[in-house]
């Protein structure tokens, strides 16, 4: 291990430009409101609207441009300055809001700076660690980072490795021995490597927990605690999560220091201009309905279901109808899963039937139709699924007859928030809670028009505030 202490200084030397520093709180807040951003915490940096002002080096901006990334997304405008100044950050937003770039870019910039300052030597590093719940997601992020650094020819060479099950570790270990800047891993494999003293986090400056809600859902809590216990207390923690369930609240209270919470509210989804429809269907009718439902659009069509059995059943049924289909779930071999995603994204498959867990965090391109074979148990999972859709896609959801009224109520409110006509099937569902809207149709919480309690920005901000460590 190295003799220099790399861990006490922040990830990057980036400082907020003076022009932005001078903005008063009111103006910062107005800019956030315009972009449906809610930020909570002490001394939150302002939104910064260009990669140039964010200090992203010119060559990297050129590479991003080639990837059709010209300006930061709303989330990145807030998250990048927060992460770049070294603050613990929790990003809560829907999928496709650009969270991955928001944490990858600072790690890449930080690694370049480190390597520029002093070459990494044998056994040194990592500067940054990214922990994700699935191998596919790890691979996707790995490829994304490689794409950027491989093209950055005028910058010092930085090394990235994948530390996940199913990958030959021999080559990765070789790179590790040369000194590594960024590690992308799944929790099980990483805690194993830490226990065997093959990886050290003593000099790690930032740890990212991507899809943090899913990491905890999948029971990786103990692994995460072990991983964090190997890091220095000064290590920056970055969490990305689509929802903030209780476990995340507790976790962030314990693990994060003076954090900034950033929430991109749901209204931003309305930009996708989706058509969302629901149909009642008994369990036995669903397969038969499927062919008719699929006629609504051209492929690619993504079918979501809650369990592996249904995913397999759908695959078999459509295969017999000579449709190019595959399924994606935890019971499939890694190479089958990778192949299915590749084929679907390249247009070789018309239909992919997937469970939520398997599809979590993956990017699918230009999906025209999402069919929810069943309504997930939580509205957040429904929203996650919807986020996989391309622009102007159709979302069809099969509702069973015995669904929880509150869940249907959540669905109805979500459709209202996304400016959808309420399907006749949901019209009869009473708000039940007069608390949702006042008699004048205003938000029952802040009494302002144009939104409901379920999407009230003031309420969301107050909820986030309550999550902050005391
Ligand atoms: N500033 C940007 N401008 C244009 N495209 C972008 C920008 N940032 C990211 N993208 C692209 O948008 C897509 C989704 O981004 P990304 O995967 O970072 O979203 P995410 O919020 O992490 O989603 P998920 O929760 O699904 O992981 C990717 O194809 C990415 O390359």
Image (cartoon, rainbow, N blue to C red):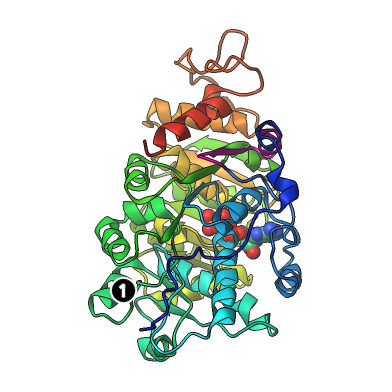
Q: Position of residue 374 (x, y in %)?
A: 43, 44
- Which quadrant, please, contains the N terminus? bottom left
Residue that appears at 38% across and 41% down:
245
Image-based side of 37 in relation to 212, left or right:
right
| Residue 154 covered by magenta stretch | no
Q: Position of residue 215 (x, y in %)?
A: 36, 56
Depth check, front residue: 421 or 437? 437
Image-based side of 74 in relation to 86, left or right:
right
Q: Is residue 426 placed above or below 355 in the rendered structure? A: above
Residue that appears at 26% across and 80% down:
197
Is label 1 in a helix, a strand or a loop?
A: helix
Q: Residues within 10 Å of mark 1 (few under 14, many from 20)?
A: some
Depth check, front residue: 159 or 190? 159
Q: Position of residue 120 (x, y in %)?
A: 48, 85
Q: Which residue is most to the front?
A: 4
| Residue 299 appears in the figure | no
Q: Which residue is mark 1?
A: 189
Q: Is residue 77 placed above or below 58 in the rendered structure? A: above
Report if the beta carbon of the residue with label 1 is closer than 8 angstroms to ligand 1: no
Residue that appears at 72% across and 50% down:
18
- Which quadrant, please, contains the C terminus? top left
The quadrant where ligand 1 appears is bottom right
Depth check, front residue: 335 or 320? 335
Q: Which residues are magenta?
A: 29-43
Image-based side of 123 in relation to 74, left or right:
left
């Amino acid at each position: 291990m190295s003799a220099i202490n790399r861990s006490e200084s922040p990830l990057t030397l980036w400082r907020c430009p003076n022009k932005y520093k001078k903005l008063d709180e009111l103006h910062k807040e107005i800019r956030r409101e315009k972009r449906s951003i809610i930020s909570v915490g002490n001394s939150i940096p302002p939104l910064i609207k260009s990669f140039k002002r964010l200090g992203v080096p010119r060559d990297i901006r050129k590479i991003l441009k080639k990837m059709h990334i010209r300006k930061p997304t709303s989330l990145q405008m807030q998250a990048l300055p927060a992460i770049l100044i070294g603050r613990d950050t929790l990003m809560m937003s829907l999928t496709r809001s650009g969270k991955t770039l928001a944490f990858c870019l600072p790690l890449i910039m930080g690694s370049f700076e480190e390597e520029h300052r002093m070459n990494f030597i044998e056994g040194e590093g990592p500067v940054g660690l990214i922990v994700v719940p699935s191998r596919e997601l790890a691979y996707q992020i790995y490829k994304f980072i490689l794409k950027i650094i491989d093209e950055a020819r005028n910058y010092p060479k930085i090394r990235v490795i994948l530390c996940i099950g199913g990958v030959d570790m021999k080559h990765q270990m070789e790179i590790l021995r040369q000194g590594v800047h960024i590690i992308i891993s799944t929790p099980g494999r990483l805690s194993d490597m830490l226990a065997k003293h093959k990886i050290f986090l003593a000099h790690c400056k930032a740890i990212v927990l991507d899809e943090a809600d899913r990491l905890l859902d999948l029971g990786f809590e103990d692994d995460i605690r072990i991983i964090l216990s190997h890091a220095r207390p000064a290590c920056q923690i970055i969490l990305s999560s689509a929802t903030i369930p209780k476990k995340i609240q507790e976790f962030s209270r314990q693990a994060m220091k003076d954090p900034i919470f950033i929430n991109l509210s749901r209204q931003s989804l309305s930009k996708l201009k989706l058509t969302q429809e629901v149909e009642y269907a008994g369990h036995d009718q669903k397969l038969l309905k499927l062919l008719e439902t699929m006629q609504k659009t051209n492929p690619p069509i993504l079918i979501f279901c809650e369990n592996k059995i249904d995913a397999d059943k759908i695959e078999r049924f459509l295969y017999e109808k000579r449709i190019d289909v595959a399924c994606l779930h935890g019971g499939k071999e890694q190479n089958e899963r990778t192949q299915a995603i590749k084929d679907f994204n390249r247009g070789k498959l018309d239909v992919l039937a997937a469970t939520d867990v398997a599809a979590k965090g993956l990017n699918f391109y230009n999906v025209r139709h999402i069919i929810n074979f069943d309504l997930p148990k939580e509205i957040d999972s429904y929203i996650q699924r919807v986020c996989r859709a391309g622009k102007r896609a159709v979302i069809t959801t099969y509702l069973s007859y015995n669904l929880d009224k509150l869940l249907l109520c959540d669905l109805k409110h979500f459709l209202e928030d996304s400016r959808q006509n309420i399907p006749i099937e949901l019209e009869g569902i009473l708000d039940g809670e007069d608390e949702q809207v006042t008699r004048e149709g205003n938000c029952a919480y802040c009494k302002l028009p144009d939104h409901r309690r379920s999407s009230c920005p003031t309420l969301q901000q107050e909820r986030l505030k309550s999550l902050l460590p005391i």
